[in-house]
Amino acid sequence: MTLSDFDFALPPERIAQHPAIPRDAARLLEIDGDRLADRLVRELPGCLRPGDLLVSNDTRVIKAQLAGRRGAARVDVTLHKQRGPDLWDGFARPAKKLAVGDEVAFGPGFAARVSAKHDGGEVTLRFDRAGEALMAALAAHGRMPLPPYIKRPAAEAADERDYQTIFAAREGAVAAPTAGLHFTPALLAALDAAGVCRAQVTLHVGAGTFLPVKTENLADHRMHAEWAELPAATVAAIAETRARGGRVVAVGTTSLRTLEGVAAGQGALAPWAGELDLFIRPGFRFRVVDVLLTNFHLPRSTLFILVAAFAGLERMRRAYAHAIAAGYRFFSYGDACLIHRAEAA
């Protein structure tokens, strides 16, 4: 398969600019074999079984977009990966205005120095503070890093709430794990009442999640590495779920990539923390996840390639065609689908 196999036409009006209110009022397309069922996210408890395990990502989005100055020149930076307590990689625009050693001021008394320059407008910045002090400065001077297909000049005040999941606890993401945006306290209570168990992983989503695949041969594409952690409690919960005949339900592709990445790298699940750069494409052997809750993704993207690997390309083509015709809303603030893994996937 090549990249062109994962292309499809998406009308621009299908791209959601704001989330559903309340969050669990978003639509849900259930994909189970060749069966498609139109539902709402709040109906999720009825789609799962008692004893299933819902695994979500507890990463928290930071205000990773910064407007800076190098002298009189404006430089915008989107941070995407933390390298150390005071060191971050980011994409700078225009990067040509920066040289190694330059200082970029992001606010009164808040600055960073260019430590290195890389291809594609990427730079490494060393900030004038570290740890919690740096997180506080980003919260004060940064903006929520909305994806480029949400068309507005800058994040609105509501985005500080809307672009954060109910599970968010550990700061470090520069993009939201968007399947988690659909959950509300009422939905979690309904899942608990239905006997669905819950566990968490952490994957700090990087801006690389928005980078296009530029190689027609999928084997030539390289993913940006992201930091992830699979805690011992979640490993134990998965073992208990398997023992009672339950299924593992991943909330979003980030949760799925964490679970499957650890299993693929170690041959089995065990507590783990480190960097993941797993690119899941058709032919991948899934070892952990049985059901995936995810949003509708961009054509020719690593995320659409992932769901095609999980459920089968033709099945996902039919599902996406149905979603477009039925008026589903796409991408980060859009609707969701619940995908049961194809036996042959």
Image: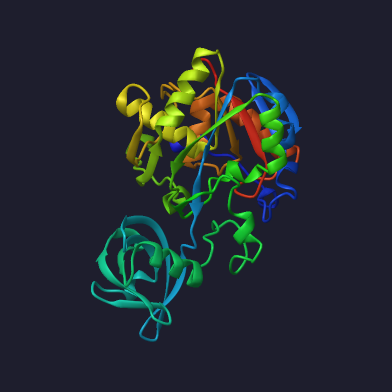
The image quadrant that residue 84 belongs to is bottom left
Q: Could you tell me how many numbered marks the image carries?
A: 0
**Looking at the image, which is closer to me, 38 or 58?**
58
Is 278 on the left-hand or right-hand side of 337?
Answer: left
253 displayed left or right of 127: right
Q: At x 50% / y 71%, what residue is drawn?
A: 140
Query: Is residue 281 visible in this depiction of the protein?
Result: no
Residue 291 appears left or right of 41: left
Q: Residue at x 38, y 32 (%)?
A: 261
Residue 289: percent from left, percent from top: 50, 25
Q: Quadrant of residue 66?
A: bottom left
- Applied colour scheme: rainbow
Residue 124 location in percent, x, y?
A: 30, 63
Q: For the point 50% across and 13% down, which residue is it?
A: 243
Please identify the residue farthest to the bottom as the structure is shown: 72
Q: Give the camera-side residue of 70 and 182.
A: 182
240 or 27, which lies in front? 240
Q: Is residue 116 above or below residue 190?
A: below
Q: Can you say whether 187 is above or below 206 in the image?
A: above
Percent x, y of residue 83 = 30, 56
Establish if 146 lies above or below 245: below
Q: Where's the N terminus, which quadrant?
A: top left
114 up-or-down from 234: above or below = below
**Residue 287 shows in this picture:** yes
